[in-house]
Image (cartoon, coloured by chain):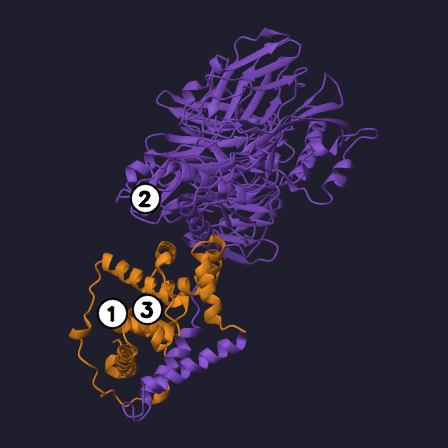
């Protein structure tokens, strides 16, 4: 083969002398140019074709070849049972397409063929658009009208040309879900009347989350009004849980007399009643031990840094002063403050001793800075240039594209800020020294992001999203996965502040009627929060390991599964079907009975659809005995393989209780729900067989989460059923209904984020 | 022992009936056809569109394909050349006619031969793109795909002699333009400012 190749090269080379004979090219210049051109152009690198494109084109060609052969030659048609021919046979899928094609299609003109950016990719990113490329100009309205995505999604479509359609989901795709895009054959009509051989079917899947519990930001469970305030400019929690607001007055909920500072701002503790801690104050900072409150007080042309007891009752103590117009102070420890002192950074202790600090840091004329906890880094804007200082090395880095003020994570290891790029806001997270910046989420065009706030654990960032015509709303993102959603539909919100436990976010909501401080209670991630949740999480982990082994299969899978079993437990390995599935959901983990150490974990194993074969699922219930943080399988029940129904499906369910007699379920759906069908009419909660009244149901479309809350409950077992008329945005009803049994109320404890 | 051409002819004959054999042909020729198309158009998307069109046309026309003693790839190139031409025509790019372009005059400036060796592929492709259509196709197949005159003739539906003339003229024009451009760029008048 090599010899043949060399011989050919030589023949082509020799042929050049024929093209440029000496008689027509006496000085040999053209021949020389030709040889150079050949050398240059045959060695130039052209980019390789996309492997997916190449593979898909091959499959499409062969499918058409088979269809043409079939149309010419009668063939036997056979229809196998769902599992009859065996799972995972991709060739069968293709045969399915061909058979359908033969039955449906008369020989036509030039058939429509489509390539998809996501075709057969089981690990598509949740923020990826679905791009379709047709082989000829299409009737655009017809194609869009015939477009369907399962599980149902609300999407926008845009034609880049008559052959290229971009489909963008309104909200991010759901992680770990098998999707199927279909366009009916009649709708997929080309401008010359051609159609495809059969319905266009494009299967793909999304990658699972790496850390399920932290994969989603928390959701709203309840909103409570805390206080009515006037001119609020800052809201924050002290480490001991006191909620502080900087405002002109504050009237705590349920009290009659407001605390006020006539004509000026003061720091109020929003207890009941609200208490004025510091009149005429700015820049309040509670100390790490919650014993003191530092703030700035105007004194003539300068500002004085004062400290009062956070519990109230003490006299202000002046520890320093600054000529800066807008000075900042930050606690270094319980007795020392770092502050902007006119020429640069200074440190003052509670005895009033002042020393210079970090002389390499240049501050802007206002004296503003933001210090990382632990003083690993500091942000300032000298001469208006956003600059990040590494306080350990003294090096600095200019931040580009930054909008507003950055925030540091509670452990001081990360910085987050809003950046404007390509006309869209994004939340960028980097190390606290600015290394490895990455855009975690990008806002839709026209939506402004601001007021970032790290959760106390550092897993989430709350933000304010301002949309023209809608106003400012509270959102949150999960750093591990980049998933984000609006926490509530409340508008006019600002100043988000996380509670120290991460169980709530307080905000100010300003409407035409004034400003209110609201506290939004948040849901718990799966398996976290309540007492006993550690055991539930351990059971979930054990069952997830089992399911993962069933998905991955391989020679060692059965042996590894045996290692999960409790002593004396046997499970027929023939029922485990290792390697026959593409993904799984660990839906819920609940104690078998009140106080039991045995948990029932709902699992669902899925095989993704392929062209021509539907998705298949098997329900599985694992009984897991938990000792400490270790779970062992004691029993396993598998259902029958069933074709996945077309309606919405619950893929995760968590339960928590924030008060005695209350329960909150957060159900994660795989599809966009029709909001009109969400409500008490589609939810039934019974306790000891008696229907519970007054159940509150809400739905957050951006995260596809339904939150169900009931209060005033007794101690009997609960059964939650969610069924028709609940439907997805394509009006497909949920079927079968989702059911979750709780032997008892979850132990009352605040949910944790 | 059989020649490569005979082996290929048998494969093509089987590919008319057997999809897998067509798949084998696809696997063999996809890289060079895609490479050729991608070198002639500006975007990957268009290259993919045209390459798809080439292979679907080949599949649909395979039953009518008869070997002419040239590689099967010659036929694929022929389809690709036509598809690229159709693409640019659909874009309404003005196409020069061979007859409207005067023959190059051998009056190239006396620039050192070494200058020509410093050509970049990008500028050469740009200049080839400016040649009349027939010259451009012949030049692309000759220098970009390293095909023989007979194969190019098969693709273009022309005699070897006609292809030889197109390549000769195209090379001469290209050399003249590249050297002229280089001389302009090197002279003070040609410099900005």
Q: Residue furthest left?
A: B100
Mark 1 vs 3: CB contact within 8 A = no
- Label 3 secondary element: helix
Chain identity of mark 1:
B
The quarter holding residue A702 reads: top left
- Mark 3 vs mark 2, foreground winner is 2
Q: Residue furthest front?
A: A74
Residue at x-position 56% and y-position 52%: A433
Where is residue A562? Give x, y as percent: 77, 36
Where is residue A116? Give x, y as percent: 42, 46
- With respect to residue A235, does A272 lie above or below? above
Where is residue B33? Give x, y as percent: 40, 63
Chain colored orange: B
| Disc 1 from disc 3: Cα separation | 14 Å
**Label 1 packing within 10 angstroms: few (<14), some (14-19), many (20+):** some
Where is residue B126? Give x, y as percent: 30, 71
């Amino acid at each position: 083969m090599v010899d043949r190749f060399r011989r050919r090269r030589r023949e082509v080379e020799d042929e050049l002398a024929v093209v440029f004979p000496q008689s027509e090219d006496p000085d040999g210049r053209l021949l020389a140019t030709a040889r150079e051109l050949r050398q240059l152009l045959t060695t130039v690198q052209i980019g390789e074709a996309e492997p997916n494109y190449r593979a898909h084109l091959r499959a499409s060609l062969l499918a058409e070849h088979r269809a043409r052969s079939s149309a010419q030659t009668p063939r036997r048609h056979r229809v196998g049972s769902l599992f009859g021919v065996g799972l995972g046979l991709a060739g069968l899928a293709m045969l399915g397409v061909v058979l359908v094609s033969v039955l449906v299609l008369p020989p036509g003109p030039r058939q429509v063929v489509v390539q998809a950016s996501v075709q057969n990719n089981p690990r598509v990113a949740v923020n990826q658009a679905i791009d379709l490329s047709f082989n000829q100009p299409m009737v655009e309205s017809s194609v869009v009208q015939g477009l369907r995505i399962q599980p149902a999604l609300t999407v926008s479509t845009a034609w880049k040309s008559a052959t290229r359609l971009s489909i963008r989901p309104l909200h991010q795709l759901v992680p770990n879900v098998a999707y199927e895009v279909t366009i009916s054959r009649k709708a997929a009509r080309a401008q010359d009347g051609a159609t495809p051989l059969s319905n266009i079917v494009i299967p793909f899947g999304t990658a699972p989350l790496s850390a399920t519990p932290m994969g989603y930001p928390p959701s709203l469970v309840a909103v409570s009004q805390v206080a009515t305030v006037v001119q609020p400019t800052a809201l924050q929690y002290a480490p001991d849980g006191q909620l502080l607001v900087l405002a002109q007055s504050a009237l705590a909920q349920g009290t009659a007399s407001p605390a006020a500072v006539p004509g000026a701002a003061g720091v109020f503790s929003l207890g009941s009643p609200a208490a004025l801690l510091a009149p005429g104050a700015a820049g309040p900072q509670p100390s790490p031990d919650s014993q003191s409150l530092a703030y700035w007080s105007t004194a003539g042309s300068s500002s004085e840094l004062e400290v009062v007891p956070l519990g109230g009752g003490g006299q202000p103590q002046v520890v320093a002063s600054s000529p800066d117009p807008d000075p900042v102070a930050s606690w270094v420890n319980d007795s020392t403050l770092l502050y902007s002192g006119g020429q640069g950074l200074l440190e003052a202790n509670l005895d009033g001793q002042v020393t210079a600090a970090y002389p390499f840091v240049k501050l802007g004329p206002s004296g503003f800075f933001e210090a990382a906890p632990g003083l690993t880094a500091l942000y300032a804007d000298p001469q208006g240039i956003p600059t990040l200082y590494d306080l350990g090395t003294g090096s600095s880095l200019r931040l580009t594209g930054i909008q507003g003020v950055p925030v540091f994570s509670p452990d001081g290891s990360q910085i987050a800020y809003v950046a404007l790029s390509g006309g869209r806001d994004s939340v960028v997270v980097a190390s606290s020294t600015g290394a490895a910046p990455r855009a975690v989420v990008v806002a839709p065009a026209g939506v402004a992001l601001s007021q970032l706030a790290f959760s106390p654990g550092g897993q989430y960032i709350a933000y304010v999203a301002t949309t023209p015509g809608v106003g400012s709303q509270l959102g949150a993102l999960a750093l591990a996965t980049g998933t984000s959603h609006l926490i509530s539909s409340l508008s006019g919100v600002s100043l988000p502040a996380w509670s120290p436990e991460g169980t709530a976010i307080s905000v100010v909501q300003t409407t035409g009627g004034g400003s209110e401080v609201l506290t939004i209670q948040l849901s718990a991630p799966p398996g976290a929060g309540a007492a006993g949740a550690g055991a539930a999480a351990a059971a979930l982990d054990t069952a997830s390991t089992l399911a993962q082994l069933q998905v991955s299969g391989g020679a060692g899978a059965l042996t590894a599964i045996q290692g999960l079993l409790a002593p004396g437990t046997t499970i027929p390995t023939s029922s485990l079907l290792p390697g026959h599935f593409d993904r799984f959901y660990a839906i819920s983990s609940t104690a078998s009975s009140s106080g039991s150490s045995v948990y029932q974990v709902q699992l669902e194993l899925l095989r993704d659809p392929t062209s021509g074969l539907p998705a298949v699922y098997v329900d599985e219930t694992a009984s897991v005995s938990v000792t400490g943080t270790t779970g062992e399988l004691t029993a396993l029940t598998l259902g029958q393989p069933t074709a996945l129904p077309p309606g919405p499906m619950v893929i995760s369910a968590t339960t928590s209780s924030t008060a005695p007699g209350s329960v909150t379920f957060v159900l994660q759906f795989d599809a966009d729900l029709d909001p009109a069908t969400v409500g008490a009419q589609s939810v039934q909660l019974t306790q000891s067989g008696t229907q519970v009244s007054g159940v509150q149901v809400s739905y957050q479309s951006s995260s596809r989460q339904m939150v169900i809350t009931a209060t005033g409950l007794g101690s009997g077992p609960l059964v939650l059923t969610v069924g028709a008329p609940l439907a997805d945005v394509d009006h497909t009803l949920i079927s079968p209904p989702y059911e979750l049994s709780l032997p008892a109320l979850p132990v009352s404890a605040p949910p944790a984020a | 022992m059989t020649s490569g051409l005979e082996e290929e002819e048998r494969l093509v004959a089987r590919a008319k009936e057997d999809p897998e054999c067509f798949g084998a042909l696809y696997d063999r020729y996809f890289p060079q056809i895609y490479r050729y198309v991608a070198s002639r158009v500006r975007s990957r998307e268009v290259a993919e569109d045209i390459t798809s069109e080439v292979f679907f046309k080949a599949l649909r026309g395979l039953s009518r394909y008869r070997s002419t003693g040239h590689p099967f790839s010659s036929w694929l190139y022929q389809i690709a050349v036509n598809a690229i031409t159709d693409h640019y025509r659909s874009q309404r790019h003005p196409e020069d006619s061979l007859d409207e372009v005067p023959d190059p005059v051998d009056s190239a400036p006396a620039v050192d031969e070494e200058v020509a060796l410093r050509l970049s592929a990008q500028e050469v492709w740009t200049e080839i793109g400016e040649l009349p259509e027939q010259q451009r196709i012949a030049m692309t197949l000759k220098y970009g795909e390293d095909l023989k005159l007979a194969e190019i003739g098969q693709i273009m539906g022309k005699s070897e002699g006609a292809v030889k003339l197109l390549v000769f003229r195209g090379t001469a024009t290209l050399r003249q333009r590249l050297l002229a451009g280089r001389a302009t760029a090197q002279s003070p008048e040609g410099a900005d400012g």
